[in-house]
Amino acid sequence: MSDLQAALTHWQTLLTRRGFPARPYAPATAPEIAAAEAQLGFVLPPEVRELYLTCNGSAGGLILGQPLLTLTQMLEVYEGWRVLLATDRFIVQDNTNEGLYSSTPPQTVKLRHWLPGWLPLCNENDNSVTVDLEPGSAGVSGQIVTTGRNEDDHWQLAHTLADFFRLSARLIETGAVQLDEDGRWKTEDCFNPFCAVKEGIRRLES
């Protein structure tokens, strides 16, 4: 069993025991992945390819209480951002103003509104947990970060997908975050899943 498979299996088992099974869809096929890569214009990193060869999306909250996007959904979200960056002059202007953004830890994520190397794994109100293939100078390619309309402070959540699922398990197992009655992430003060995970990470590190 690969590192990713082990971390993902543990995380899915934990979700099921807590009453919120991820309900993964059937794996994507090699031709489906090749078609997605052709549309993107680049090859998916090995961990992302392995994830989709394991499950092509989910019905339950595999990613911070949100379903994992199917390949088709991921491409739709990705293309939506690509079109906005080509047509919306306000977003184009914002994307060149680094002062509007920050990175936690510093310099791990580039200070942009969106980049072509950002692959969304989930999507809530145009905010995503994202695989970052264009990291900042202190980041690593393939890192898992937060991006989106309300995510001007981009957080590096993990260096790899396997580490991301291990982090997810630690946050729940230690009580740094909780799951509400719908399986959404929260802390005492934060009910937005992106805000809650950041608060949860602060608690782990304190």
Image (spheres, grey):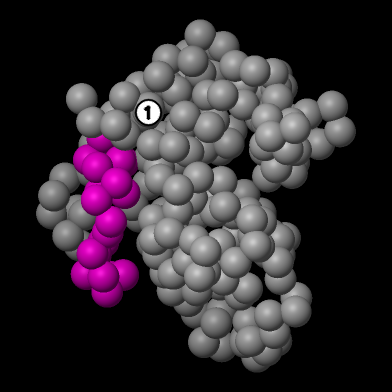
Q: Residue 35 placed where, x, y %?
A: 20, 62
Measured along the vertical axis of the image, is residue 71 above or below residue 115?
above
Which residue is depicted at the point 45% across and 53% down?
143
Helix, strand or loop for disc 1: helix
Q: Main secondary structure of the magenta part?
A: helix
Q: Within the image, what quadrant is residue 9 found in?
A: top left
Instruction: Judge left or right: residue 147 versus residue 37.
Output: right
Image location (x, y in percent) of residue 26: 26, 33
Q: Residue at x 56, y 46 (%)?
A: 157
Establish if 9 lies above or below 139: above
Q: What residue is disc 1 on?
A: 8
| For residue 175, above or below residue 128 | above
Residue situated furthest top in the rendering: 17
The residue located at (37%, 27%) in the rendering is 7
Q: Is residue 151 left or right of residue 78?
A: right
In the picture, residue 53 is in which quadrant?
top left
Q: Position of residue 20 (x, y in %)?
A: 54, 18
Q: Is residue 122 magenta?
A: no
Q: Nearer the viewer, residue 150 or 70?
A: 150
Q: Is residue 193 visible?
A: no
Q: Residues within 10 Å of mark 1 (few under 14, many from 20)?
A: many
Residue at the left extreme of this rendering: 31
Residue 13 visible: yes
Looking at the rendered image, the quarter that the C terminus falls into is top right
Work out whether residue 97 or residue 62 is closer to the camera in this orientation and state it: 97
Query: What amino acid is found at the position of numbered circle 1 in the picture?
Result: Leu
In percent of width and height, residue 186 lies at 74, 30
**In this rendering, position of residue 7 left or right of residue 63:** left
The magenta segment: 36-56
Q: In which quadrant will I find the N terminus? A: top left
